[in-house]
Amino acid sequence: DNMIHRRSKNKHGKKGVAEFVTKKGIFFKARIKGRDGKRFQIGVYNTVDEAHEAYKKASIELHGEFSNTQTVG
């Protein structure tokens, strides 16, 4: 359970969000890791905040009382 709360560094300061660039523009992936270590892609969003909200919802559903949806840093 403690590994769920490990912090990662990203330039947006939002846990569970990664930026990627395509020919159509900049987008943000929301990803989460389950208790078994398996990574799930939640979705692709136009803004950091949309992606982080999706991450927070998935975190609460997946981890329940052990959910940690705070920002990074």
Image (tube, rainbow, N blue to C red):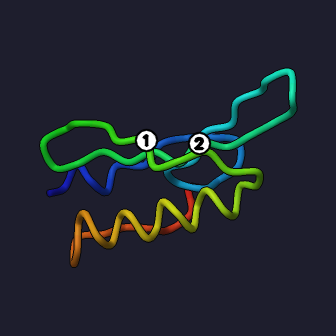
Q: Residues within 10 Å of mark 1 (few under 14, many from 20)?
A: few
Which residue is painted at 31% across and 57% down in the image?
Answer: 5
Counting from the top left corner in percent of width and height, residue 65 is at 22, 78
Eyeballing the image, is 56 above or below 13? below
Q: Are marks 1 and 2 in contact (CB under 8 Å)?
A: yes
Total numbered labels: 2
Residue 29 lies, with reference to residue 63, above or below; the image says above
x, y percent for residue 2? 19, 55
> Identity of the amino acid at label 2?
Lys
On screen, residue 57 versus residue 52, left or right, reads left
Which numbered dot is residue 17?
none
Q: Nearer the viewer, residue 16 or 28?
A: 28
Q: Is residue 38 left or right of residue 40?
A: left
Nearer the N terminus, badge 1 or badge 2? Answer: 2
Q: CA distance from mark 1 to mark 2?
A: 7 Å
State the quadrant of the C terminus: bottom right
> Which residue ends up furthest to the front in the rendered image?
24
Q: Residue furthest top?
A: 23
Badge number at residue 29 = 2
Percent x, y of residue 68: 37, 67
Question: Tag 1: residue type?
Answer: Gln
**Image location (x, y in percent) of residue 50:** 67, 63
x 47%, y 42%: residue:
8
Q: Nearer the viewer, residue 29 or 65?
A: 29
Q: Residues within 10 Å of mark 2 (few under 14, many from 20)?
A: many
Viewport quadrant of the N terminus: bottom left
Q: Which residue is mark 1?
A: 41
Q: Secondary structure at mark 2?
A: strand
Query: From this viewpoint, which residue is outermost toward the bottom?
Result: 65
